[in-house]
Amino acid sequence: MRERTSILEAVAAWVLALVWIAPLAYALWSSLHPAAFATSFSLSAPLTFDNFVRAWHQAPFGRYYLNTVMLVSLVLAGQLLLSTLAAYAFVHFKFRGSGVAFALALLQLMIMPDVLIVENYRVISKLGLLDTIPAIALPYMASAFAIFLLRQTFKSIPRELIEAAKVEGAGPLQILWRVYVPLARPTYVAFALVSVSYHWNNFLWPLIVTNSVESRPLTVGLAVFGAPETGVDWSVINAATVMTMAPLLIAFLIFQRQFVQSFMRAGIR
Amino acid sequence: MTDVPADLPRTSGGARAWLTELNAWLLLLPASVVLVAFTHYPVLATIRSSLFVVRRNGTEIFAGLDNYRAMADDAIFWKALVNNVWFALGTVPTSMALALLMALWVNRNIRGRGFLRLAYFTPTVLPMIAVANIWLFFYTPDYGLLDQLRALAGLPGWNWLGDPRTVMGCLIVMVIWKEAGFFMIFYLAALQQLPPDLSEAAAVEGASRLYIFRRITFPLLMPTTLFIAINAVINSFKLVDHLVIMTKGGPNNASTLLLYYIYEVAFTFQDSAYAATLTVVLIAILSSLALIKFGYLDRRIHYQ
């Protein structure tokens, strides 16, 4: 399949790629130039970081960054811990009701927390957690998808390794920590990248449960900042937009191959 | 589920088996608590809420199917549902066709493959809300990029997102741009697993590239196509972030979608019983799609 492509096709592929990169390139352009050049693309337009400085001073983006980092870490830590324990239970132990329990867990693949906003808001409110970072994280902390992926991976681990650990006198938790977890590393990395991307970008649920600077993640902060009523000019909004995307985008540019492979592996999201 | 669990008790029955069960349930406990609290309980609570109405003093009274009758008479609900269908029809086939084209190109020995793959995939890692901000500017009347282009051609400005005739199309174009690269990687993965001998043999026979694609590659990609299609349709019911800052479902509900309408009813109009009723419909749609998906995936596993 790897034969040479005709010139015409190569040109078409490149044109599509340039069209595809254009909106992002535009956001970068307008964020780095004075507002007067927002729609006039001149090579002599002076470069400036002024838009970033203004955005940073007009809204607490430092705090939003901190909130998003805390949110993403909390979700990921919860997901990895809870789904590792659950997947281990399904693979390593024989117990009554394990089939039913697994099917019930998989229900979350069909009905994700994203659509249960009405009742989840009530649950969070009953727990007294409204307007906190754990409120955003909690519904996602047990991921059926992570349980499913890890169960698949754990099942493929050779039994000899587990038997050997047992002979050495390892208890159940030691077997999990020393045999299963290290061998499932690629799955953990793939899931982590997908989870971090998803929760860095997630918007509707955080918008619903947060109401203050102290808990708002970047995406919600950006929406509040960019609201038309605020009258901030486009170049500054674009600078804020670039700030919101930048960490994930830079990580993606550096670890491109790893990202693409992770999304392939853990693609259902 | 046919393989033997590693920790089978040596003597079945007895204290050891009981301990094994206890261990297993203890390991499951944390995940179960979260899943029950934020998936199973909310689903049941949603169904229950949809059968009650909340009176002004806060007490609930059983209303049977009243909420559902109200929903059947609610023009906005139907509008949102029809919009969802158009949104799926507008975004899914086009973004999948583009995704396939991208994957075919990137899979070939084309100059600058690395850059092409990067360019196609990048929109996937961007937050929807940031994407909406960027595209909002393109669509801004008079001052926005699109109208500036129109001005070059001597055409007057157009309120792209403010006109019911153009708003949906504008949002569809944006979502196609956002999603195509994501679907591309599934096609790419599938293309890399296709046996090369078939198309090589056909090429030796003198078959044209288009013929090879139509008769060999595309049919072999059919399972991938169906897989992406179902996931894409499911996803189209969850994509509403952009509405919050671009249109708020307007003008005159021309761009509202079911999940966005649920959000509005619950948190703007504060009618949680009716929001629950709408959620039941969304749950039913998503479950049906998921059942199709799992049914189909099961069949594929049997055939292989």
Image (tube, coloured by chain):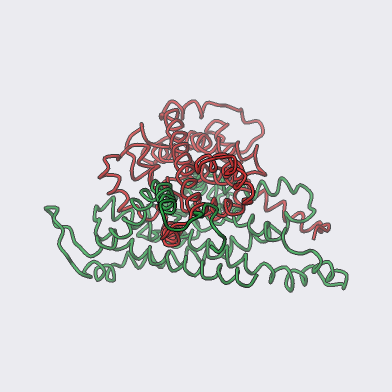
Along the line of sight, the residue nearer the viewer: A26 or B155: A26
Q: How many marks?
A: 0
Residue B226, x across and y down, in percent? 58, 68
Per the rendering, the colour in which chain B appears is green
Q: Is residue A189 above or below residue A54?
A: below
The answer to whether residue B66 is visible is: yes
Q: Nearer the viewer, residue B7 or A221?
A: B7
User: In the picture provided, is A151 more to the left or to the right than A112?
Assistant: right
Which residue sits at x=87%, y=73%?
B205
Frontmost residue, A61 versus A11:
A61
Q: Quadrant of residue A164?
A: top right
Q: Position of residue B295 (x, y in %)?
A: 51, 70
Q: Nearer the viewer, residue A43 or A102?
A: A102
Q: Quadrant of the C terminus of chain B?
A: bottom right
Left or right of residue A236: residue A210: left
Q: Residue at x 59, y 43 (%)?
A: A167
| Colour displayed for chain A in the image of the structure | red
Q: Is residue B289 above or below residue A257?
A: below
Q: Relative to B212, does residue A66 appear above or below in the rendering? A: above
Q: In this rendering, does residue B245 appear at all?
A: no
Residue B217 image-quadrant placement: bottom right
Residue sitting at x 45%, y 67%: B85
Instruction: Give the percent coordinates (x, y) of residue B276.
Output: 29, 59
State the image coordinates of residue A137 (x, y, percent, origin top left): 40, 42
Extreme residue toward the left, this view: B57
Q: Which quadrant would residue B250 be assigned to in this image?
A: bottom left
